[in-house]
Amino acid sequence: MPVAGERTRGSLPGQGGRARITVRPGARSMRGRTPFAVLVVALLSGGLVGLLMLNTALNEGSFTLARLKKQTTEATDQQQTLQQQIYQQSAPDALERKARELGMVPGGDPAFLAPDGKVDGKAKAAEDSPPVPRSGNEPWQRPGASPAPGATPADPGVELAPAPPAVASGSPFGSPSGSPSPGAAR
Amino acid sequence: MTRPPADAPRPRRSPSGRPDARRRVGEPRRSADGPPRPARPRPSGRPRPDARPGRRPAPARRPASGPKTIRLADSRRRLRLVTVCLLLVFAIFAGRLVQLQLLDSDALAAAAGANKYVRVTLPAERGSITAADGTVLAASVDAYDITADPTMFTPEASHLPDAPEQAAALLAPILNQPKEKLAAALHLNPKNPKSQYALLTARQSPAAKNQISDLKATLLKQSDTATCRGQRLLLGKPADKGGRQFLDPSCATPLAGVFWDQSTRRSYPAEGLAANLVGFVNADGVGTGGLELQYQQQLSGQEGHSTYASAGGRRVPTAGGSRQDPVPGSDLRLTVNPDIQWAAQRAITDQVANAGAEKGYVIVQDVRTGQVLAMATSPGFNPNDLSSARADQLGNAAVQDAYEPGSTAKLMTMAAVLDTGAASADTHVTVPNTLQRADRVFHDDVDHETWYLTLTGVLAKSSNIGTIEAAEHLGPNQPAANKVLAGYLDRFGIGKPTGLGFPGETRGILAKPEDWSGSQQYTIPFGQGLSVNALQATSVFSTIANGGVRVAPSLLAGTTGPDGRFSPAPAGAQTRVVTQQTARTLTEMLESVVTDEQGTGNKAQIPGYRVAGKTGTANRVDPKTGKYSGYTASFIGFAPADQPRVTVSCVIQDPVNGHFGGQLCGPVFKQVMEFALKTLQVPPSGSEAPNLPVEWKP
């Protein structure tokens, strides 16, 4: 209120205005300044603290997010690895090999038991003499030269414990027809 | 506003109620229409004419005469000038604002978005391929590409004289790669020494990645000792101050420059099982062979994307964005029975090896539904290890090879002869040793005295000459007979696509009857001079087994969409080719091929089941030269003959050890058919084979 002095001079004849004009604005402004300053400071510090808390919350959230994402990835990886192992071990080829390791052979000509107890065909113990003699060739290339196919399923990409340094590119190439594959372990 | 008493001589007040200080120094009063002056406050209608002049002598509207007044007039003009300038500036601002906000807003928003928003592609999960019982043949799994930054392996950066070799020695057992290859990748790329990227191995399992990351962490921990920290401080210092160039091996972290990126891998857990059908994907995960290629669209799904605002590489959580979820691909379920498929692959692999043949195929088809239960080829391949397979092994020869079927095609000729009523199963046929037709002399497989055979016998002993003679009765003259035969061949599906739509499938070769050459019209009845694929040939026998109704073969049982609902594939189209009576007679004739001691297919007998089938031994057209060379041995049949369930076909190309179809493919048929009947739990035949007569006494 810089006009206060002027006003005092300008309103010399009106004495009643003097007390009001000179004192009031000064007192009011002095009184009004402190709460305003306090308010501003409070607002500023409140804003800063709010911002800090917001940032903290956000960062905390992103840490949680990252941790949970990692957990999900690990769980997914594990689930897929185990699922793949189940798939591999339940594949007909793997089952056949397991069965052979247990000493089982494919059944030969079937015999039938009629409802009246009569047996059709010759019931005899199965012997390993398939109509097509086994050649030793594998229907497809076995990866690596892993000699223990029962212990580790053959897909190298999904094995939990990779085999000792087997040279992958040294696996048998497509065996030309007629000659037994060098990679035929069994 | 407070006012002084009215009677006192008052100072002039400005409209805002303040005394006008400037006016007190004797300025002339300005006109009342000064720009910033609003309406003057009216003090309650009291006249104040005396107040106006007051003590001031200066008249109100006189032009200024002093230098001060000139300045004031200037200031007004200046004010106006400033106002105009400001208005101009603001007008420009406003115009620009309009331009930015209204006219160019879309383009600008897009340009801003491009900088502000990050678009991430969300890959869709590729559908799986399963066999009929749910055995997974192909599935997509998470994988990691192992990469490296070669610039971190230089002696200067790693402080090791041989960082690439050390890292390669650590990585080789995990990645199953030769050390030398890895070390070469870790050295600076000579073509691009600044390159910070080298792909060590693509698509490794999470387990391999975890091993590498554990190893990396362990090494880092081990090297974090006081000794090592001391050594690191001395690096790069001159030698006389105890400086050193390299770290001790115990302090080295040779894997510091090894990283990994997430990717996906197509896994074939059953390995080579049905690999010829399933096919394979390329390095980008796009189907490039077999069903992976044929159903690429359904399997791949639709990739989604996520858009979010990013500042300083971090996501701005409140800035919105959009997200479109990917639509996963559909899962395919095939009609293939994995056990029968395996048995078929086992049998054909063994027999192709035993016979020293080039290749062979086995197809197993359900008679009633036309569904393919197995389709095996040998040699096969392992889709998990494509690099070690030859290019010619990667296809599905069972539908991609066209071959001359030979005697198995005699079934179609016999079907035509019986169906038109030109002959019956016991019609007497005299078969001389040779037969002169057109420009050629025809023989049978074996040299023989004149045979006296029934039509059944012609089929059982697979006589070419007898078949030519029978086919000649199809019409009053040869062109007419050709036309009738061609009509039947067409209805059996010869020369037409099988309907599978399999990539690279052949429709075979069958000329129009008008174009059959002089000798071709006599060779086609016994299966030379036309080409089929193995599925077409199998379908012919399935048609007879199904009572003369052809069911189009199918390989896809159905698809499971992203919503998890299974939608079965439409059933194969049915067309009647021959009458049921003809089909029954033909079945009985085919049985004598297997049961009669003079038949060619004795090796296909299965105790307990009646088997109907036909051998084929054809001269093979070498695909390389286009000339006849070698043989095609085949056997196609179905069982049980009294109530057919399954058709099995076996074809072996270019065998060396033996070449008769009955000899080579008979056992394969028996092994696969026996396995299929047992797997499908087919009850045994309840009756004996009819044993039609094959000979007659002249």
Image (spheres, grey):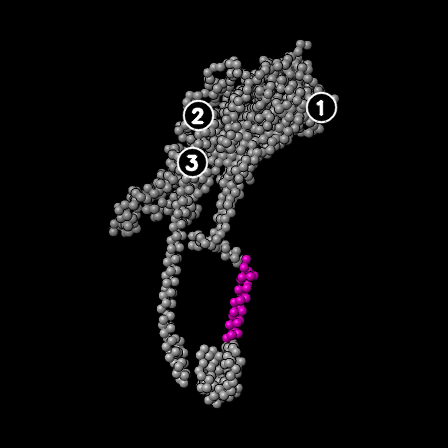
Q: Position of residue A150 (x, y in %)?
A: 41, 27
Q: Position of residue B213 (x, y in %)?
A: 37, 42
Mark in front: 2 vs 1: 2
- The picture quadrant where one finds residue B462 is top right
Examine the structure image and report whether residue B89 is included in the region drawn in magenta. yes
- The residue located at (43%, 23%) in the rendering is A100
Q: Secondary structure at mark 1?
A: helix
Marks 2, 3: nearer the viewer: 3
Q: Secondary structure at mark 2?
A: helix
Residue nearer the viewer, A33 or B44: B44
Residue highlighted by disc 1: B481
Amino acid tagged 1: Ala
Q: Residue furthest bottom?
A: B57
The numbered mark at residue A81 is: 3
Residue B478: give x, y in percent of width and height: 72, 23
Instruction: Give the percent coordinates (x, y) of residue B298.
Output: 55, 39
Q: Quadrant of the N terminus of chain B?
A: bottom left
Q: Which residues are magenta?
A: B82-106
Specify the label residue A97 is tagged with. 2
Q: Chain of mark 1?
A: B
Q: Chain of mark 2?
A: A
Q: Main secondary structure of the magenta part?
A: helix
Which of the pair A164/B211 is nearer the observer? B211
Chain of the residue that carries numbered disc 3 in the rendered image: A
Q: Quadrant of residue B161?
A: top left
Q: Do the residues at pointers 2 and 3 share their chain?
A: yes
The answer to which of A62 and B378 lies nearer the viewer is A62
